[in-house]
Image (cartoon, helix red, strand yellow):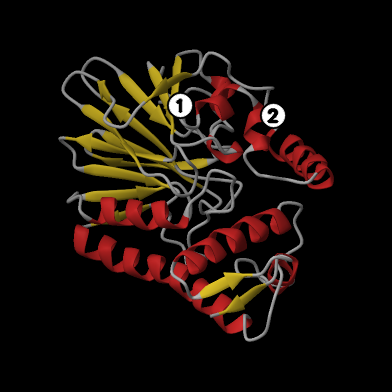
């Protein structure tokens, strides 16, 4: 395997993690490689991956976000993503559609992606797969686990017999879960958290920040803290609804980002996050929406 100054290689039985030298913070991430007796699988080639380090037989993309396909152009093998996200891997414009941007936001985000990632227009050859799809690598199996919420097609991968569960952007960061896309869902995210909580593994790998956590007890402890961020955001929203508010009011108040963060996609994320939480609160009869689009506590 060729060495690279961009990442540090760490082995976990049949799994090698290319840990970003930038700590895995966006736009960087940790790439996973799985080597079996008959084939090799790469998962989420990051911005730090500037070549195919193993002669991969397949690449699995956990979901259609630019940081997870950043290194995909260096691979000539078959490329896969979940059916619900594969269109965003095939086309950068479809990927951008998924962010729910205004025209001005879209132009700025498109330029930012071009500057940071230099992506091609897309990978039209990408193949859609479903939950439970298994990559047979010989003496190693890598099984796709659908974990929607972050995006509609967000997936993890369980690698056996190593006992390595890659959870992608269920990244356990203190920042908390991201669900600001058109296809995002708070309820599905919470369900996906429970899905991975129920899986006993030896190691748990994230794309961003934490990298690899050893042991189910430690993973579940961190997962509890991570899930709590969703509930804290909802509580902050309820407190902000001490008087009637509109969605633009909530976007300006911010549930996700701190006030000083100035990035072209921030308002879009805040807008979608607010809408999703408001939908939950309306469904739970804690909030009502008036005819003129104002939200009030019941």
Quarter where residue 193 is shown: bottom left
Mark 1 falls on what kind of element?
loop
Residue at the spot x=51%, y=54% of the render?
A: 23
- View extreme (right): residue: 104
Residue with the mark numbered 2 = 93
Q: Whole-percent x and y of residue 104? A: 84, 45
Mark 2 falls on what kind of element?
helix
Asked whether 56 or 249 is in front, the reply is 249
Check disc 2: other Cα within 10 Å, few if <14, some if 14-19, many if 20+: some
Q: Quadrant of the N terminus?
A: top left
Left or right relative to 246: residue 57:
left
In the rendered image of this protein, does residue 291 appear above or below residue 120? Answer: below
Quarter where residue 245 is shown: bottom right
Residue at the spot x=33%, y=37% of the render?
A: 16
Count of numbered labels shown in the rendering: 2
Residue at the spot x=41%, y=17% of the render?
A: 55
Quarter where residue 148 is shown: top left
The answer for how far apart the CA atoms under marks 2 and 1 are is: 33 Å
Residue with the mark numbered 1 = 2
Question: Closer to the N terminus: mark 2 or mark 1?
Answer: 1
Which disc is residue 196 wearing?
A: none
Left or right relative to 267: residue 210:
left
Q: Whole-percent x and y of residue 92? A: 66, 28
Q: Whole-percent x and y of residue 127? A: 45, 18
Asked whether 26 or 192 is in front, the reply is 192
């Amino acid at each position: 395997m060729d060495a690279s100054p961009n990442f540090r290689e760490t082995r976990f039985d049949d799994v090698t993690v290319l840990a970003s030298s930038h700590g895995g913070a966006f736009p960087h991430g940790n790439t996973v490689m799985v080597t079996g007796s008959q084939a090799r699988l790469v998962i989420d080639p990051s911005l730090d991956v500037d070549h195919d380090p193993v002669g991969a037989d397949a690449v699995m993309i956990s979901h259609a976000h630019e940081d997870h396909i950043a290194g995909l152009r260096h691979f000539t093998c078959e490329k896969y993503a979940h059916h619900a996200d594969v269109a965003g891997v095939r086309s950068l414009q479809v990927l951008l559609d998924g962010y729910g941007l205004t025209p001005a936001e879209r132009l700025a985000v498109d330029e930012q992606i071009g500057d940071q990632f230099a992506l091609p227009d897309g990978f039209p050859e990408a193949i859609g797969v479903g939950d439970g799809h298994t990559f047979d690598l010989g003496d190693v199996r890598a099984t796709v686990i659908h974990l929607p919420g972050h995006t509609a097609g967000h997936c993890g991968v369980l690698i056996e017999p190593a006992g390595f569960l890659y959870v992608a952007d269920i990244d356990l960061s203190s920042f908390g879960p991201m669900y600001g896309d058109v296809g995002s869902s708070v309820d599905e995210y919470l369900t996906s958290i429970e899905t991975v909580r129920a899986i006993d593994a030896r190691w748990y790998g994230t794309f961003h920040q934490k990298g690899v956590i050893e042991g189910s007890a430690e993973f579940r402890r961190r997962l509890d803290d991570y899930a709590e961020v969703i509930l804290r955001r909802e509580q902050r929203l309820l407190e902000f609804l001490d008087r009637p508010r509109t969605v633009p009011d909530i976007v300006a108040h911010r549930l996700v980002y701190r006030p000083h963060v100035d990035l072209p996609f921030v308002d879009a994320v805040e807008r979608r996050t607010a809408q999703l939480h408001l939908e939950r609160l309306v469904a739970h009869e804690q909030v009502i929406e008036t005819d003129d689009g104002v939200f009030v506590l019941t």
